[in-house]
Amino acid sequence: MVYDASLELLLGKVWDGGRITPAEALRLYRLPLEELGALSDRRRQLARERAYNGRGNQIVTYIVDRNVNYTNVCNVYCKFCAFYRTEQDDDSYVISHAEMDQKIEETMALGGTQILMQGGHHPKLSKQWYLDLLSHIKSKFPQINIHGFSPSEFIHFRDVFNEPLDQIIREFKKAGLGSIPGGGGEILVDRVRKRISPLKAMSDDWLNVMDVAHEHGLNSSATMMFGHVETIEDRIEHLERVRAQQDRSLQRAGATDGEGAPVGFTAFICWTFQAEHTKLKAPTVGAHEYLRTQALSRIYLDNIPSVQSSWVTQGPDIGQIALKYGANDLGSIMIEENVVSQAGTTFRMTVADMGRLISDLGYEPRQRDNWYRLLN
């Protein structure tokens, strides 16, 4: 084997916590999986050193929340989605306040602290409908965080309401919105987005929503759905754009959350395209590629503190292994999930399952809230 001095320098930089370039990322991607995994685990340790009073390396977190899809009516017809319906479909719906109350009460009974509320791009729901729903939830369940409305939904709101994004996000926050999920990120490369979801928000729009949300003190997550028509270089460009946005958000003067901490992306989650029942004809990828991409994401996203394992798409076993490939969080127990399950993926877990998977690796399982504050 020929000695490669430049590769040794790169590996040393990664081990020491240095920032890598897109070209270096591509080189790391080609490493043996076990070697890349070891580097990502090292970066996980470096990222968690200051967390939880110096015990961040020993703790793996999870959250108890519920996915609530307020409507399945959508007019963007993404090729990778099996969830959406048109208004004319017999099984289309819009949630009522009573149905929402029941879902939240069930969530709280299981120790839940949050709802992840997303829906289709309904062409006829008014801004007041959303504000009334937010106000209703916040007044009846003040202890529940509303983690709601992905960037593509906000772009839809901007266009349907014909109002500035800044104003909409300000009003939604006042009505009760607590944070924003990173759904709809897919791949932040417009050439790819035009192939898989041509009617959905493009890359600059997605990032602009996050920028405005962070400016208004709303934390968010960031995501990537891969393994379809994109290239490895596209995935790296996605990571670069997320990292650059996080730099901008964290450097913004005066934008802090309720605890006085800087506002930005709290976590990154990537998952693979689930092909069943969708219109997108693409060769999806397996666990090996998932672990490789997550590991690279942990190394590249040096300014995002947490990485979630995507057991929902990969299953509990790979979800557990992902904790050795850069992840420090198992995400949600998923009391309810309606989107990827429509594409044929139906994994489920309980709090006990989460605890066992974490403990079996020698970590300490702890429940958290959306801001990664420990609850037990």
Image (tube, helix red, strand yellow):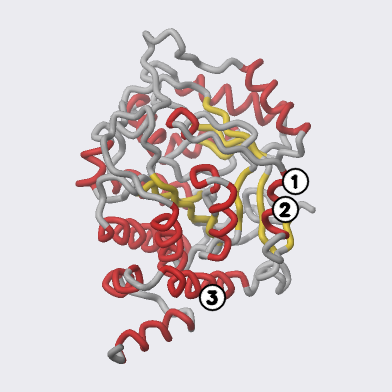
Kindly identify the amino acid type of the residue bearing the numbered disc 1.
Ala
Mark number, residue 356:
2
Looking at the image, do the residues carrying marks 1 and 3 touch, with CB atoms under 8 Å apart?
A: no
**Observer-nearest of 279 and 77:** 279
Spatial separation of the CA atoms under disc 1 and disc 3: 28 Å
The residue located at (45%, 64%) in the rendering is: 295
| Crowd class of label 2 (few under 14; some 14 to 19; many from 20; radius 10 Å) | some
Tell me the element at label 3. Answer: helix
**Observer-nearest of 27 and 300:** 27
The residue located at (71%, 74%) in the rendering is: 54
Residue that extends furthest to the front in the rendered view of this protein: 1
Q: To which residue does mark 1 refer?
A: 352
Tell me the element at label 2. Answer: helix
Spatial separation of the CA atoms under disc 1 and disc 2: 6 Å
Tell us which disc is closer to us: 1 or 3. Answer: 1
Kindly identify the amino acid type of the residue bearing the numbered disc 3.
Arg
Residue 332: horizontal and vertical position, in percent? 62, 44
| Residue 173 appearing in the image | no
Mark number, residue 42:
3
Tell me the element at label 1. Answer: helix
Residue 48 against residue 167 in the figure, above or below: below
Kindly identify the amino acid type of the residue bearing the numbered disc 2.
Arg
Looking at the image, do the residues carrying marks 1 and 2 touch, with CB atoms under 8 Å apart?
A: yes
Spatial separation of the CA atoms under disc 2 and disc 3: 23 Å
| Residue 255 appearing in the image | yes
Residue 83 against residue 306 in the figure, above or below: above
Residue 40: horizontal and vertical position, in percent? 49, 70
